[in-house]
């Protein structure tokens, strides 16, 4: 059999398969229900547990005033003097911080986020809030979020973002689940290969 006739046979089989698709094994399921067990913990507790399991560093703040105090203490402990932030509202929350406007030389970057996913301990970031570069290029990523931004599952997050942006959906949606890591190098886990070595989440109870 020539190569051309073999190719024709393959294409014919594909066409036939597409015309007569295999029925779904569970026709009553439309994929609208969660595959995971119902949440047993409070959303905040669940997120904190999952986030720290993945080597994230979690800090709870009752107010924005407490947030400022906790961040200042962290900067003193780590001896950070070069912080990067593109969000004007966040900058206004920290009037005493001397901001570094060069992402290449900063020691840590601060961002907001779209949402926090409790089930996976993930931070949802988007290009619409200018979170693409700071969350990847800085050696340390600090996320400031509020209790009202907590959702249970990734599906809940995507539904919310779809409703929020509708026809202006962000060009990039990122799930940051702890520091970047890879085990491709001789099956040894290495942290911070293609992103931040440390990720902090400051969760504020109310704005």
Image: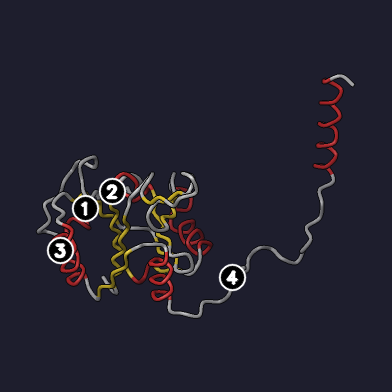
Give the mark nearest the N terminus, 3 or 2: 3
Q: Nearer the viewer, mark 2 or mark 1?
A: 2
Image quarter in which the C terminus is found: bottom left
Q: Which mark is residue 88?
A: 1
Q: Nearer the viewer, mark 4 or mark 1?
A: 4
Q: Cβ–Cβ below 8 Å for labels 4 and 1?
A: no
Q: Nearer the viewer, mark 2 or mark 4?
A: 2
In the rendered view, does 28 fall on the left or right side of 41?
Answer: right
Residue placed most toward the observer, 192 or 135 = 192
Q: Which residue is mark 4?
A: 36
Q: Cβ–Cβ below 8 Å for labels 2 and 4?
A: no
Residue 77: image location, x then y, percent = 16, 62
Tag 2, which secondary structure? loop
Image quarter in which the N terminus is found: top right
Give the mark nearest the N terminus, 2 or 1: 1
Q: Cβ–Cβ below 8 Å for labels 3 and 2?
A: no
C-alpha distance separating marks 2 and 1: 21 Å
Tag 3, which secondary structure? helix
Residue plotted at (47% across, 64% down): 120
Residue 74: image location, x then y, percent = 19, 63
Residue at the far right in the pictured view: 1
Residue placed most toward the observer, 190 or 146 = 190
């Amino acid at each position: 059999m020539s190569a051309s006739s073999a190719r024709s046979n393959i294409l014919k089989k594909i066409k036939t398969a597409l015309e007569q698709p295999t029925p779904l094994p569970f026709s009553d399921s439309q994929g609208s229900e969660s595959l995971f067990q119902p949440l047993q913990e409070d959303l905040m507790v669940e997120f904190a547990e999952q986030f720290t399991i993945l080597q994230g560093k979690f800090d709870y703040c009752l107010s924005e005033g407490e947030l400022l105090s906790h961040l200042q203490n962290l900067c003193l402990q780590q001896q950070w003097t070069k912080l990067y932030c593109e969000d004007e509202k966040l900058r206004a929350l920290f009037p005493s911080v001397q901001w570094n406007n060069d992402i290449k030389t900063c020691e840590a970057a601060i961002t907001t986020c779209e949402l926090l996913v409790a089930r996976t301990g993930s931070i949802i970031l988007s290009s619409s809030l200018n979170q693409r570069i700071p969350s990847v290029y800085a050696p340390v990523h600090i996320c400031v979020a509020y209790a009202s931004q907590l959702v249970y599952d990734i599906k809940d997050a995507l539904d919310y973002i779809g409703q929020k942006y509708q026809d202006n959906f962000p060009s990039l949606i990122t799930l940051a689940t702890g520091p970047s890591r890879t085990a491709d190098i001789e099956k040894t886990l290495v942290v911070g290969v293609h992103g931040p070595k440390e990720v902090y989440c400051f969760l504020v109870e109310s704005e």
